[in-house]
Amino acid sequence: MIDKLVELFALAQGWLFQGAVEPLMHYAGLGEFTEAAFEGTEWFLIGVCELVVLWIVLRPLEFFIPVHGFTDRRARWNDFVYTMIHRLGAFSILIFFVLDPLGDHIAGLLHLEGFKPFNLDDLWPGVTDQPVITFLIYLVVLDFFDYWYHRAEHHVGWWWGLHALHHSQRNMNLWSDNRNHLVDDFLRDMVMAVIALFIGVPPAQFVLLVVVSRMLQSLQHANVRIHFGALGERLLVSPRYHRSHHAIGSGHESHGAGSLGGHNFAVLFPVWDIVFRTARFSKTFEQTGIRDQLPQPVGSNRNYGNGFLEQQWLGLKRAAASARRHSS
Ligand SMILES: [Zn+2]
Ligand SMILES: [Zn+2]
């Protein structure tokens, strides 16, 4: 079954590449980049598959077991635009223009220095060379760095200015994982890919790691009443666990005056929150948003923007204002 799907995928990739991408590249005089474009086509198609699977699996769940019955259709559509931009376009372009050349450059430098990338396979022959085990180890190691990246997004003023866009969604839905500031998205993809390179993740595994991580994160943001039980909640981040991170007035404000601390920063594995004492296992499905979006006296009716462009612009303004405050 999986073999057949892989075959079908390769067929679609070849067909799309030869039928559309390659002729376009030649027409635009970009013939020398065709190899990278082939890889870009793969990421585009992976994105398409993700969107289809998410829609088939999560939309019915949102219909039958929603947290909040009311859905702001416009907000959901807007988050879908974010998902398309990131998973169909921006990520492929980033790989294409930045990561591939950067990867080659770093690999070249390391080679010159006589540095051999860390090789998990040799660590415990018979165990760490099993593909499933290596995959899980890479997933956990990358998740550790993701946890700290996420903490930094909440802790550093300008970074929170960008990340607040993600938290300003009061109607969380299956597409909300990608509701991020583009600058922050690029930064995170770059950081994670460079770390993957340094710890020696093979390219084929990198694709799978990205897909598994993105699918799980989409589930976490869906408007579904799902938790994994007492033990499960401690093993894998569930929709309820992550919702608690988005909870209005408690989940995520760890920066600035009147700071509320924040909890549940883990991206896939709550173990980091447990170890670094930021875990909170709430039994309720909380309302999401940012405190200052509320009317006075709690908040200030702050506007985080309705459409994509306004949200991006306001994010930049918040980040710049915070950086200015810090430097003065
Ligand atoms: Zn989130
Ligand atoms: Zn956050």
Image (cartoon, rainbow, N blue to C red):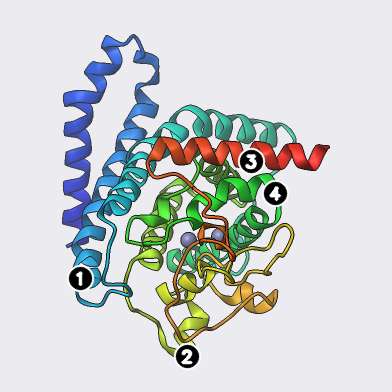
Residue at x-position 57% and y-position 69%: 249
Classify 117 as above or below 212. above
| Image coords of residue 138 (percent x, y) | 54, 61
Tell me the distance, in whole angstroms, between the alpha carbons under discs 2 and 3.
38 Å
Amino acid type shown at disc 4:
Gly
The answer to which of marks 3 and 4 sits earlier in the sequence is 4
Q: In which quarter of the image is ligand 2?
A: bottom right
Residue 258 appears in view: yes
Distance of label 1 from label 3 (alpha carbons): 36 Å
Tell me the residue that label 1 is attached to: 63
Q: Name the residue under label 4.
A: 157
User: Is 323 drawn above or below residue 297 in the view shown?
Assistant: above
Name the side, left or right, on which 276 lies relative to 129. Answer: right
Q: Which residue is drawn at 37% across and 41% down?
A: 307
Judge the density around disc 1: few (<14), some (14-19), many (≥20) Cα neighbours within 10 Å: few
Q: Do the residues labelled 3 and 4 touch (CB within 8 Å)?
A: no
Q: Is there any visible trace of residue 114 in the rendered image?
A: no
Residue type of the residue flagged with mark 3: Ala
Label pair 2/1, CB-CB below 8 angstroms: no
Residue position marked by numbered label 3 in the rendering: 319
Q: What secondary structure is marked by label 3?
A: helix
Q: In which quarter of the image is the C terminus?
A: top right
Point out the frontmost of discs 2 and 4: 4
